[in-house]
Image (spheres, rainbow, N blue to C red):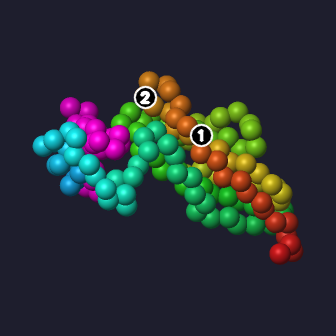
Amino acid sequence: MPAFGRLCRASVGHLTTSDNVAVRRATEACTRDAKVRVDDEATFDWHVNTVALYALEARRRDDGAVQLTAGLAGYSPAFDHFEVSVDDTAWQRVTGARYEAQLAPGEHVLRARLVTSAGYPGPTSRVDLRLAAAGEG
């Protein structure tokens, strides 16, 4: 059995893994009857192969640029790695779940996706940023 556990599909169309404590109840129900409906969205509303992209820190450097640290989280039964693109540049492979960039003040677009072990990219998540120049409100 793979390290991520045995998969089952609930009637709402989401996948769970039996190794994930947060969805243990849903998984146990799923192993009894694959058509059990799970309504607890806080526990079980994950979209497979998507990325949650969030800012961990934004710090102004002495040269006026902003050092941005972003966190990446995703769920995929065949996860391999994340990729990030800033302002429509080429996709960059990210090791781990953090991405750091030095950005000039102004407007930027940060995109992220996960890639499966078969090499297929998931849907793109996007965050629009407006970084104020030093002294701007």
Q: In this view, does 45 lie to the left or right of 89?
A: left
- Judging by the rendered image, the residue that carries numbered circle 1 is 124
Mark yes or no: residue 121 visible: yes
Residue at the extreme left? 32
Frontmost of labels 1 and 2 is 1
- Residue depicted at x 25% and y 38%: 8
Q: In which quarter of the image is the C terminus?
A: bottom right
Q: In which quarter of the image is the N terminus?
A: top left
Q: What element carries label 2?
A: loop
Q: Is mark 1 on a helix, strand or loop?
A: loop
Image location of residue 80, percent across then percent down = 44, 34
- Judging by the rendered image, the residue that carries numbered circle 2 is 117
Mark yes or no: residue 43 visible: no
In the rendered image of this protein, does residue 81 appear above or below residue 126?
Answer: above
Q: In this view, does 82 lie to the left or right of 59?
A: left
Number of numbered discs: 2
Amino acid residing under circle 1: Thr
In the rendered image of this protein, does residue 117 appear above or below residue 136?
Answer: above
Residue count near mark 1 (Cα–Cα under 10 Å), binned few <14, some 14–19, many ≥20: some
Residue range in magenta is: 1-23
Image location of residue 107, percent across then percent down = 80, 55
Amino acid residing under circle 2: Ser
Residue 40 painted magenta: no
Image location of residue 79, percent across then percent down = 42, 36
In three-dimensional space, the C-alpha distance between marks 1 and 2, rounded to whole angstroms, equals: 17 Å
User: Residue 23, labelled with which disc?
Assistant: none
Residue count near mark 2 (Cα–Cα under 10 Å), binned few <14, some 14–19, many ≥20: few
Helix, strand or loop: magenta stretch: loop
**Nearer to us in this view, 28 or 81:** 28
